[in-house]
Every structure is written in C-alpha cells, then in structure tokens.
Amino acid sequence: MKNAEIAAAMDELADLYELDGAVIYRVVAYREAAIAIRNSPVSVAQLALEDRATEIRNVGKTLQEKIRALVETGDIPAAQKLRAKFPGELVRFTQLPGLGAKTARKIYDELGISTLAELKEAAENERLRQISGLGPKAEQNIVKALAKQVEEGPAQRILLSAVLAIGDKLVTHLRDHPTAERVEIAGSARRMTDTCKDLDIIATAHDPAALTKAFTEMELLSEVSGGREAGARGVTHNGLQIDFRVVEPDQFGNVLQHLTGSKQHNMELREYAVRRGMHVSEYGIEEDATGETHRCGTEERVYEVLGLPYIEPELREGRGELQAAIAGELPQLVTEADLKGDLHAHTTLSDGRSSLADMARAAQKRGYKYLAVTDHSASHGFGNDVQADELLRQVERVRALNEELDRFKVLAGTEVNINLDGSLDYADDVLEELDWVVASVHTSFRMGEENMTKRMMAAMDHPLVDVIGHPTGRKILQRDPYAVNVEQLVAHAAETGTFLEINANPDRRDLNDVHARLAAEAGVPIVINSDAHSRRTLSVIRYGVATARRAWLTKEHVANTRTWPQLDKLRKRRAKAATSRRR
DNA sequence: GCCGTTTTCGGCCCGACTGTTTTCAGTCG
C-alpha cells in the first residue's frame, strides 16, 4: 500500500473525527500525521508491519496500530464505525469554502440533510437560517460555492516555471522603480515547490503608494483590486493571482518569513518559540519575559532572535529542518554555481533545436567545464532516432569539436532507451565508443510495478550505464509517474554504483525532492541534468538545483559538482577497474 | 493523538475575516 493511500486514510479519519466532535487536537494530530506520511521517502506500510511507523514524526502508538490494521485488512475499524454514523457526502460539505465540520454537523443534526443536492435545495429555499448561527448570507455563500464547484472543479495549480516567468519579470520591473527599496518573491514560489496556487510579492519603498501604483499599472495584469497605500491584488492574463504588499522596512524580515511559510514550518517554528517564551507573528517576535517585541528587518534576524541558524526557504517544509537547525546540523545546500557540467542534453541529431557546436559553446558560456551530448537512441520513435552508425559519426564530430574548444570538454554520449526486458537499445560495442551513457524508459509506461522495477534494475546492472534518466517518468500536472518501486531502485543504484538523475526540466523534476533525499541518504551519487533540447533551455538547470536543495543535497551529494576527471573516477566502470587493479 | 533543552502530563501558532451576534464562534491560510 502506497504512502499516499495511507495518508488519505488518515485525512479521512481526521474528517470523520472532526464531524464526530472530537477534540480538535486529535483531529489535527491525524492531519499532521497524514502530511508526514505523504512526505516519507520510505514505505510506511512496511514500517507499520515491522512496528516501526512511530519513527515517522507525528505518528505514535495509536496511529501505528491503525496503519497496521489498514495495511493488513484493508480498512480501519474506527473508520468503518464512523462511516456508518455519518453519511458519505457529509465530509464533502466541509470541503466547501466557509463551511466547516461544526456547521456541517449542525445542518445534519437539525435538518437531517446529508447530500449536496439536499444542501443546495435547503439553501435555495431559505431553510438553513432556521439553524442558529446561520443566516441569509450563509445560504447565499453555500449556493455560490456549490455553483462554483460545478463550474470550475478543484482549484488549479500552476507550474513553478510559469509562475517564476511572471514573478521574475514583476520583481525586476518593481526593483527598477525609483521608490522601491527591497522587492522579493515570497510564498511557495520562494520555496521552489513544483507548483503554486498563487504568487506573493512583498516590498519596502519610501513611497509605498507610488510603488503600488506601478504594480497595478503593469501590462501583464488583466485585473486589479484593492490598489491602496500598502499593496494590491492582481490577476495575470493567464489566470495567476498575485498578492503584492508593501511593508515597513523594520518588519520586512518578519513578513517575508511569515509569507514564505510553509504553514507546517511556521507552526513548528511558533511552537518552538512558545517553549522558549516567545511568540512569532508576521508583525514581530514578542518576548514573554520583557514584553518587548522584536521587529526584524531581515529573515536572518528572525531566526537569530529565536536562537536558530538561518534556514533556507527550500528546507521550510516541516521535514525535520527545525530539529536539524536546533542540533546545528543543517546541510550546506548545493547551488547552481557549484555545477561544473551538464550530463544530459540533446542536439539537432535527435529532437533538439540547436547544433552540437551551439550547445557546446552555450554550455561553456554558462561557466561549465563539460557537456554530455546525449541524443535519443535508435528506437526512440518520434522520427528523430539515431541509428548506431550515425551515432558513431557523431562521436567523430565530438572529437573534432573538442580540438577546437579551449578548457572545455564535450562528452560523446547517448540517452539510450531501456527496452522492455531491461536490455539497451544499442549494442555494447557501440556503447563502448561513448564517454557517457544515460539510460531512460520511454516506452510502455503502463507496465506493472514489479516488471517496471525489474526492467530498470536490469539496466542498472549494465556496466556501461552511468545514470538512469528521469527515473519515475512523471510529468507534473500532466502524467503520473510510472509504477516503479523507487526504494528498490535506490537500493539497486547503491549496489551497482549507478547514478540517479534529477532531471531539471520544470515539467519533470524527476527524481522529486523526497526521492532524491532518499537516494542521497543511501549514498547514491545524484546528477542534476537539464535535458536541454536547445541552448536556451540549458538554464532550466535552476529547477533541478531547486529540487536538489529541497532534498537537502549538498555539493558532495551531487556528482556533477566535480571536475570531469574526478567524476569519471566515481563511475562504476572506473571504480570497478580500480578495485580489480588493487586485487 | 502527539510530544518533551522547564513537562511522561498538560499543554498544543497566530492573526484576519466573516457573519452572526449583542461580545464571539467558526473558518481559513
């Protein structure tokens, strides 16, 4: 059973307990456990079977037993009991904005309403106002919310790259304004999450009204509301909501910290502060002992007042960063500047848009020392496959190009397809001519988990496969990962000395942050690759670096922070040779 | 129901907003 399924069961129990009127802390405990379970890189089902689920934060003895029952029998007795007590659609009432468990329960108890259809009818016929606490406005809101739900479905999330394309433009424009002092992106975009719901921008200015006006007049906004002294809200032409706020300079750090979140991180931070006699809010940090409120101009100062080292935004997800900060064990996160090369890129030989020479020069211009050119293999099948003889001619061209280049090395490589049985798409004697081999799955995504895992593990067994490309095949907001057991892949990568890729394409970011952390902890070298299909898209590497940072990776975890000779020695083909020479 | 650099029991983040109220509960982020 997958972590996501277990987490969903915990969320369902939280909803049911809340309807049942349980103390809110118990309900919250289930919700927090659900988050931790969803974030767990290891199989929680497995842990529960071994009576070890309590190793997960926010999972205690009670939940360990409930999860175990769920895994062993497919359900939890407490959930069955509560489902019998409350009709199915009652939980869906609480998913309407403004309507919570307390209100849902009252509607059910006092009017016997248990379906969304009945709820709509009662709201339209003004029967809900019989209940104390509900009035005409509540009825209107319910009718509106139900209509909106039918119309729009669940809230849309937007890919980070689309959000930052707008956010970077906005920030640059606002920083150029004469009255602006500081302008920063906050919220989930600053934490570099895969997707965002909206975009938060905060600023300081010596004329806040003038800066707000500059914001509201930007062409990329299609609508603007609440344009006043200290900020406004806008919506872009492609539907991204932007919250812009101008704040006092001496509170900028407090607000930036507050709005960057995550919610989970802030809750943990505040609980920690309370234990130390302090209260954190977006306005400052109040000390119980002195009654003094510390207003902080920078985020560094916020963490300093709390007695903590600075915690990077990408770590603020409530995944143990606070405990690490307290223990002085925060990782020194890898940066884009640490990368010495890119080991997965395409040219016009397969489906890229830039030539071999253009790609090499663009990579060198970025400050890299090497670039692996890895076009698709023979059976790629989008009409841009590379037959073996053609690949060998490309190797010649690469060698010739290297003669011309100064202090830069192009590596002749391939992104070779992993066949259904785990064999590779080129013969070994062809692969032997190459400097670098990425192996990826591009066909039969719908294979069962066991077969897919075997298929990829077989590819790792090949001595010439350096790295597995985009190991789960997910496309964010578009396509689920293929069914593959990532824990087994990681263990096998460690065993065989195969690297795993963080593919930086903003649609992929694959491995994801949770899995990359698991792999790094298992000692698997990670390679951050752009998978660029043109010289311009080499820059998507920032999303791969962001994923690596969200996975707590340091420079040491990432193989391509090394020079090519250093990296070369790390590979299984060399490491094995070294071992046998020692013998 | 979970958790511990004051605690294994007694706490458990903070503020804004809304709609319904005669001073606040419920909901949200």
Image (cartoon, rainbow, N blue to C red):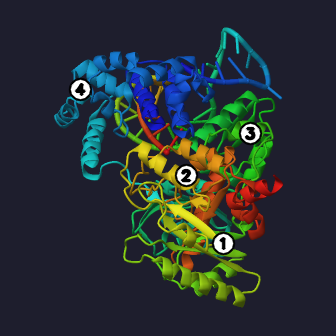
Q: Mark 4 belongs to which subunit?
A: A
- The picture places residue A21, in percent across and down from the top left corner, at 41, 18
Mark 3 surroundings within 10 Å by alpha-carbon count, few (fewer than 14), some (14 through 19), many (20 or more):
some
Q: Mark 1 points at which residue?
A: A179
Q: Distance between the residues labelled 3 and 2?
A: 21 Å
Marks 2, 4: nearer the viewer? 2
Q: Distance between the residues labelled 4 and 3?
A: 46 Å
Q: Do labels 1 and 4 share a chain?
A: yes
Q: Residue at x 70, y 30 (%)?
A: A274
Whichever of callouts 2 and 1 sits on the residue coming sooner in the sequence is: 1
- The picture places residue A221, in percent across and down from the top left corner, at 44, 69
Q: Mark 2 belongs to which subunit?
A: A
Q: Mark 3 points at which residue?
A: A324
Q: Name the residue under label 2.
A: A512
Q: The residue under label 2 is which amino acid type?
A: Asn
Q: Nearer the viewer, residue A582 or A450?
A: A582
Q: Mark 4 points at which residue?
A: A114
Q: The residue under label 4 is which amino acid type?
A: Ser
- The picture places residue A79, in percent across and down from the top left corner, at 37, 20
Q: Nearer the viewer, residue A407 or A539?
A: A407
Mark 1 surroundings within 10 Å by alpha-carbon count, few (fewer than 14), some (14 through 19), many (20 or more):
some
Marks 4, 3: nearer the viewer? 3
Whichever of callouts 3 and 2 sits on the residue coming sooner in the sequence is: 3
Q: Which residue is drawn at 69% across and 47% down?
A: A523
Q: Is residue A179 above or below residue A291?
A: below
